[in-house]
Amino acid sequence: EGTRSCSLGSIVCSDTTGSISDVCNGLDDDCDPASADGAEDALNGAACDGADTDLCIEGTRSCALGALVCSDTTGSTIDLCNASDDDCDAGSPDGSEDPGVGAPCDGADSDLCIEGSRVCSGGSLDCNDFTSGTVEICGNTVDEDCTGGAAACSGPTNDAPGSAIDISAGGTFTADLISAVNDIDDCTPSGGRDVFYTFTLPSPEVVYFDTFGSNFDTTLHLYPGSCLARGAQSFCQDDSCSSLQTQRAIQLTAGTYCLVADQFGASSTLGALTLRYVRGGRTGTAIPAAAGTYTGSTIGMPNASTPNCVGSSTAGDVGYYFMLCPADSRTVTANLCGTSPTWDTTLYLRSGSAVDGSTLACNDDSDCAASILLSTIPSTALSGAGLNWLVVDGWTTQTGAFSLTVGM
């Protein structure tokens, strides 16, 4: 790169350029045939990533035919769900390329229904199906639990109108409507499963029903006649006491009746029924569970129930009934102090049956200012769902007009 000349008695070279490195370009940059092309290239031997899709440094650069090439010929490393950065890309989440991510799956519930997909969480593939197990309902041709077939089964013993259970004696009755079929939809959305009960009243009487304790939205239908020959619907009772359960008291004439316990439509999926049926034992007048004053007369009334705080009584009497809800807690007072003091009264408070139910309070002679012959019920605590009675009666055979004042 220079020429020689004589300067100050010496032969000198005019080349003052710097050293030229032999880079990888197919040229002998350093004019040394003994050095390989790219021998002094700064990138020759540097670590590198090949043409795969990962970002992993798995090779080194070398000079070949005047170009730097990477020795990384491995395949692309995908990012699996294993809490490791397999593709060497800090910006990609763990498992971003795992073929298992997003695959359909069934969770830990008891059914076999594929209701979720797999997600990468904490280095493992988990199923995001957190639904509860779907209960298989037999007899409806639907495979709810995804086992591959609908369950065929027989329902409760009173699943059909012709197999109604006789509850005439009263009591608490249970049934599992999950295995029942839908027979009637007279007053509910279609599809609710139902069971049948029958009872017979020998004379007019107040009766009480509730379904508190059931685990689904209940409805009660009542019809005169047998369940196979039902008459016009007497009532359809749905929600009561700010709940999805049902409560009803009603005075009925003598005869046979059909009671249907139903689910409120097909969307009500559970079916453990608790039905309570209470016979009131007599006729009566419904009053609200609130304070009020009621007038009447026991003259000419039948002797439907008797007090248990006097020796004997065959006097005619008048009954008033009211219901309480499960969460109710009341203090009841009652008196006949506004009654004309011309006859000897008796007053009693009972729960359940007015005839033989539990007597909560009973009074014959009291301290009304008008007369000791008039009766008073002192403060008496009542709580819980049920049928309750206040009965105006007389001592021995005495009857008369009265004014009953109730406090709650």
Image (cartoon, rainbow, N blue to C red):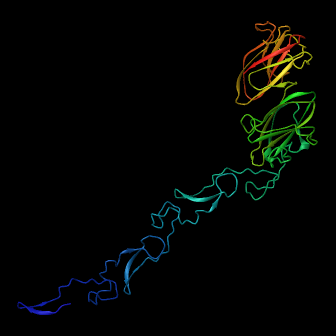
Q: Position of residue 147 (x, y in %)?
A: 74, 57
In the rendered structure, the answer to whether residue 63 lies left or right of residue 245 reads: left
What's the residue at 74%, 39% (across, down)? 244
Foreground pick, 37 / 169: 169
Quarter of the image holding residue 348? top right
Relative to 27, is 242 above or below? above
Number of residue marks: 0
- Quarter of the figure that contains the C terminus: top right
Relative to 184, is 343 above or below? above
Foreground pick, 169 / 32: 169
Relative to 220, is 40 above or below? below
Q: Position of residue 153 (x, y in %)?
A: 83, 50
In the rendered structure, the answer to whether residue 307 lies left or right of residue 105 reads: right
Q: Position of residue 191 (x, y in %)?
A: 80, 49
- In the rendered image, is residue 356 in sight? no
Q: Position of residue 197 (x, y in %)?
A: 87, 38
In the rendered structure, the answer to whether residue 330 lies left or right of residue 2 reads: right
- Quarter of the figure that contains the N terminus: bottom left
